[in-house]
Image (cartoon, rainbow, N blue to C red):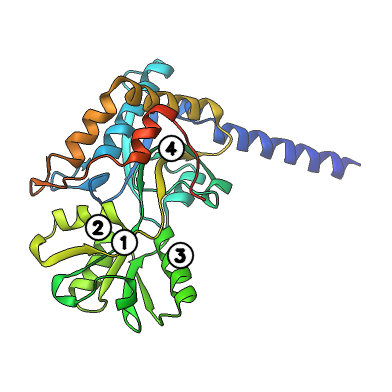
């Protein structure tokens, strides 16, 4: 009986620990620090541009959330720390409490929603191909029997595997550890194309040594939303993050940020991506939906 009581007590304490762990605002207030995640090469969302500090539209969203957390916790001197993450480790680092919020280039889908929660969607994109203009690659049929790169831990790698099987193209898929690594596989001739979200491909071209050598080609295989990622079962923090993003979208501030990062010159090379806002995103400025990709 005593053993059973101790077991129940241990389970209760574990549950309390999990509940406290999911309470991000309490965790942040107690520690005096919020840790935000950034990506090193997800242009123009979250990337390094020479200064050592991350920049991008997702970084600006994360900073706006941090400012509201300072206000909500009444801690104006709250430390804001930054942690680099990859496609592969971003979810484990969020779940284990190393980071508190990830605003990068993460697709909001139902598979990931089993482990994490997502805020209001702030971008929509789809898988396309980055290749050298001299490669002759125009669409997916041209990839038959060839080696194609994607990035570890991304939905794009899954999309390419499925498409390859359905079309029986005999593609050899190799994976880079991050987007710049995947692009390097193409640049080095180890792959003929890099399959990734089209906006990230445009961003990589914008920061490439020789942008004129590259082309984004192929049909968009799917439409997927990007959203900031936070821990599950933390309704108070999700409400705060959604509130910050929703306010930006309703006030017109988000549209100004979009213009800054997508239709104006951006660092480090002052290249303009010239990418107007997609209809899906325009609609979500009104809907404020966090609906995942199907």
Instruction: Report the residue marked by disc 4.
Output: 100
State which mark lies toward you, 4 or 1: 1
The reply to whether dot 1 and dot 3 touch (C-beta < 8 Å) is no
The residue carrying pointer 1 sits among few (fewer than 14), some (14 to 19) or many (20 or more) residues within 10 Å by Cα, namely many
Q: Residue furthest right?
A: 1
Look at the numbered disc 3 and give the secondary structure of its residue.
helix
Instruction: Kindly identify the residue that appears in the image at 56 percent across and 47 percent down.
Output: 115
User: Upstream in the sequence, badge 3 or badge 2?
Assistant: 3
User: Is 17 situated left or right of 39 in this image?
Assistant: right
Look at the numbered disc 4 and give the secondary structure of its residue.
loop
Instruction: Kindly identify the residue that appears in the image at 23 percent across and 47 percent down.
Output: 47
Instruction: Report the residue marked by disc 1.
Output: 128
Instruction: Report the residue marked by disc 3.
Output: 158
The reply to whether dot 2 and dot 1 touch (C-beta < 8 Å) is yes
State which mark lies toward you, 1 or 3: 1
State which mark lies toward you, 4 or 2: 2
User: Nearest the camera: 233 or 100?
Assistant: 233
User: Upstream in the sequence, badge 4 or badge 1?
Assistant: 4
User: Which disc is residue 12 wearing?
Assistant: none
Instruction: Report the residue marked by disc 2.
Output: 201
Q: What is the count of numbered marks?
A: 4
């Amino acid at each position: 009986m005593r053993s059973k009581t101790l077991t129940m007590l241990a389970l209760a304490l574990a549950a309390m620990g999990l509940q406290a762990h999911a309470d991000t605002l309490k965790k942040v207030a107690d520690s005096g620090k919020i840790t935000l995640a950034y990506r090193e090469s997800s242009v123009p969302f979250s990337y390094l541009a020479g200064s050592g500090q991350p920049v991008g539209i997702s970084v600006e969203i994360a900073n706006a959330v941090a400012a509201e957390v300072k206000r909500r916790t009444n801690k104006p001197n709250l430390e804001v720390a930054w942690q680099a993450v990859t496609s592969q480790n971003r979810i484990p680092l969020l779940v284990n409490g190393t980071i508190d919020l990830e605003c990068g280039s993460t697709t909001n889908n139902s598979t990931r929603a089993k482990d994490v929660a997502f805020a209001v969607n702030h971008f929509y994109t789809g898988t396309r191909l980055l290749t050298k203009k001299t490669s002759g690659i125009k669409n997916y049929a041209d990839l038959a029997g060839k080696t194609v790169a994607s990035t570890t831990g991304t939905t794009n790698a899954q999309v390419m595997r499925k498409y390859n099987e359905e079309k029986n193209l005999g593609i050899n898929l190799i994976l880079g550890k991050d987007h710049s690594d995947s692009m390097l596989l193409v640049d080095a001739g180890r792959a003929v194309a890099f399959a990734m979200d089209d906006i990230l491909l445009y961003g990589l071209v914008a920061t490439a040594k020789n942008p004129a050598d590259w082309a984004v080609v192929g049909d968009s295989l799917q439409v997927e939303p990007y959203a900031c990622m936070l821990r599950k079962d933390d309704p108070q923090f999700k409400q705060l993050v959604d509130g910050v993003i929703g306010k930006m979208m309703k006030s017109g501030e988000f549209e100004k940020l979009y213009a800054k990062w997508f239709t104006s010159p951006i660092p480090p090379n002052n290249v303009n991506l010239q990418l107007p806002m997609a209809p899906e995103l325009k609609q979500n400025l009104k809907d404020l939906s966090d609906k995942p990709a199907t």
